[in-house]
Image (cartoon, rainbow, N blue to C red):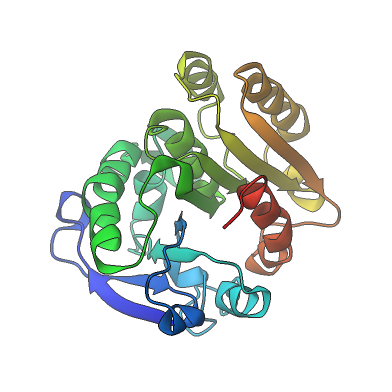
Amino acid sequence: MIETWTVTIPQLTGDTPRRAYAYVPDYFAEDESQRFPVLYMFDGHNVFFDEDATYGKSWGLGDYLQESGLPLIVAAVECNRGEDNGRLSEYSPFTFSERGLGKFVGRGRTTMNWFVKEFKPYIDYEYPTLPGREDTFIAGSSMGGLMSLYALLEYNRFFSRAAALSPSLWVAPARLERMINGARLDPDTHLYMDYGARELGNHSAMSKGFGHFTALLMEKRIHVTSRIVPDGDHSESSWERQIPFFMDALFYGKDY
C-alpha cells in the first residue's frame, strides 16, 4: 500500500504544497500488531511512480518491496521543484556556488529540522512504526545522497543507518571533511555509499575524493559499505539497480 498526500514546509516554501508518500507492507492488514522500521527518503516524487518522476522514470521502490516482502515502511517527501533551483539550497547543509547557476544558500539544517521535528513524529503517529533510532534509516541520491550523509552525521540520535547514492560530495569538500571529523556518533552507525563508474568524471577529482571520504568515514568507526557501481551513471534507472545492495546494508544484522 502506498498512500499519497500533500504537506507544506512553511520554513522553506511557505504555503506551497508538495507531495508526501508512505509505503506500508500489505501484510500489515493481516496482523495489525506488527511494527516496522522506517526508511525516510528525499526526492519522494522519484521513489515510487514513473508518472510523478522528474524525468519520467522512478526507482520503482514499491514494486521491489512488494516482490521482496521486506518488513519496511518508506516515508518520502517531494523536493522543491521550483524554477529557482530551490532543491539545491534545501538539499545542501553548506552554502556553495555552482558554475552557470550561481550561489545557493545551504538550508539543509532547516530541511532536516522539519524532517525530525514534524515529519517523523507524524509518520510515527499515523503508521505502525518502530520509532527508535536503531530502526530509523534515511536515503537519497545526488544532493539527496549528500543530505543522507549529513543526516547520519549531524542527526545521529535519530538515524542509525543511511544510504547515500551518488552523493554530491563535491559541493563543499573542506566543510564536509570538518563535519565528518567533528561528528559524534553512536558506535552502531552504518552507511552505504556508492558512485557510478560512468559519473566519476562529472566533477573534478571525484575518484580521489570518493576514496578520501570513505577513508574518513571509516576512521570515525562507521560501518561503511562503499562501492563503485560498474557502468553506473547519474540516473534513477541506475539507482534502481542498486536497491538490493543498499537494502542489504540497511538490514545487515537485523532480524525483523
Give the position of the N terminus as an image quadrant: bottom left
Number of marks drawn: 0
Residue in front for this viewpoint, 71 or 55: 71
Q: Position of residue 158 (x, y in %)?
A: 37, 39
Residue 7 at x, y = what percent?
22, 67
Residue at 37%, 32% in the rendered image: 157
- Residue 224 shows up from this direction: yes
Seen in the picture, residue 48 relative to 171 is either above or below; the reply is below
Residue at x-position 51% and y-position 28% = 172
Nearest to the observer: residue 49 or residue 129: 129
Q: At 44% across and 77% down in the image, what residue appears?
A: 28
User: In this rendering, is residue 125 above or below 140?
Assistant: below
In this image, 254 relative to 207: left or right? Answer: left
In the displayed structure image, the side of residue 76 where residue 177 appears, left or right: right
Q: Is residue 85 visible?
A: no
Of residues 55 and 108, the one nearer the viewer is 108
Q: Position of residue 143 (x, y in %)?
A: 50, 47
Q: Vertical placement of 13 versus 158: above or below? A: below
Q: Quadrant of the C terminus?
A: bottom right
Give me the residue at 25% from left, 74% from top: 6
In terms of image quadrants, where is residue 84?
bottom left
Furthest-right residue in view? Answer: 230
Nearest the eye: 67 or 183: 67
Q: Quadrant of residue 77?
A: bottom left
> Residue 212's spot in the image, x, y percent?
71, 23
